[in-house]
Amino acid sequence: MLRNKLGFSLHEICVIILITALTTSLTTGIIMYNNNTYALSDDENLQEFLKVYATLDSDYYENVDKSGMIDSAIEAMMNYLGEDYSTYMSQDEKEILNNSLKGTYNGIGISVIDNNKIYKVHQNTPAATVGLMENDIIIEVNGEVVDENNNVANMIKKTEENSLKVERNGEILEFKVMPAEINTPLSREIKERNNKRIGYIYVPSFTATVGEEFKIALEEIESQTIDSLIIDLRSNTGGYLSGATDIATMFLEKDKVMYALEDKDKRNTFKDDTKEKREYPVVVLINETTASASEVLAAALKDSYGATLVGETSFGKGKVQQTKNLEDGGMVKYTTARWFTPSGECIDDFGLLPDYAVPLNKDEIDSDDFVDTQLEKALELLS
């Protein structure tokens, strides 16, 4: 899903009119919205709908669930459009979507290997504040001994203060740490090939915090000196457009085109307006489920930065959506524009073609013999 402030579409106005009309305007025939007056009497189609609604409410032989009937009517309007990306979402569906794009979780901010060894203490988290360190061995959580039967992540309380005993260089230390809502960090590392130091960052989705977390990851690996960078967007199905533009501006020169949006009235071009830029080589990994905002970023880096695309043809989602919360707790998601790459292409239904097409044997991903051929190609190109 892509979100961008493009103004209200006709479909959004119809939904707003529908909800407001049924709750406040059946008798007046007038709707006020954003200081504009919408006369119900001017829309014969809406009058017909209201007549049916009122008839069913008063004359149907059983009591009608009016809220459910309105939900069905809204869903039917969205389905009428015949487009996969314009849909009605129930309150539960909306909450699932919003939670997946928050980019935060409740915890203390550590990553653990071998069940109890801290291999990463993330910046600006409760764990970092109290002084937990990488390579600390967690031996006890809230009075309970950590062993092969206990998973540290499950033992740590998410809403209460935790008492952790750790072993550090033969010394036993105790820490009190209160969990908090923190940003989900991005995986990153440095790979060495042929005396070249190649940074690698995996971006699984464009959450509300992805720009901030990408910058942290990028600056962390740059501080250790890199010659080039791999950005892995494979299986990234999108999210907030702002996340893609936040990352693009870290690389592009000022005034370079990131993308263009075309609604039913005009086309607007969006350019980098920051002074920040990079100059080292970048490879972007894509596959058949790289979609939406991730395609925006990949295209911007390819066309306006000179990045190389490796992998498989991307999904091909060249449309932009907005969302609108409804009074019943649900939400409508609807298409407002098509987007275009800096070179002027709309990739909808076509996708981005990789510069180097490299298949991946997905049947072997879980096997010991699996080789990530796409990543290996990227490393080969950069080394």
Image (tube, rainbow, N blue to C red):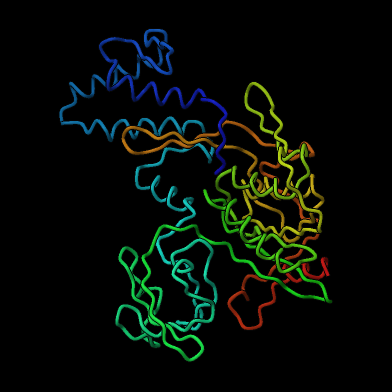
Residue at 49% across / 57% down in the picture? 183
Residue at screen point 35% across, 79% down = 141
x then y, percent, for residue 41 = 37, 8
Question: 363 or 252: nearer the eye?
Answer: 252
Whether residue 381 sits left or right of residue 373 in the image: it is right
Q: Nearer the viewer, residue 326 or 162?
A: 162
Q: Is residue 303 above or below residue 139?
A: above
Q: Position of residue 9 (x, y in %)?
A: 52, 25
Question: In front here: 199 or 42?
Answer: 199
Is 132 on the left or on the right of 288, as rendered?
A: left
Q: Is residue 144 left or right of residue 268?
A: left
Q: Quick check: 284 above or below 240?
A: below
For this rendering, which residue is in front, 263 or 32?
32
Quadrant containing the C terminus is: bottom right
Residue 55: image location, x then y, percent: 23, 19
Residue at screen point 59% across, 37% down: 320
Seen at 65% across and 44% down, the residue is 245
- Note whether 202 is above or below 172 in the view shown: above
Please provide percent x and percent y for residue 100: 46, 53
* Residue at the bottom extreme of this rendering: 170
Which picture quadrant has residue 311? bottom right
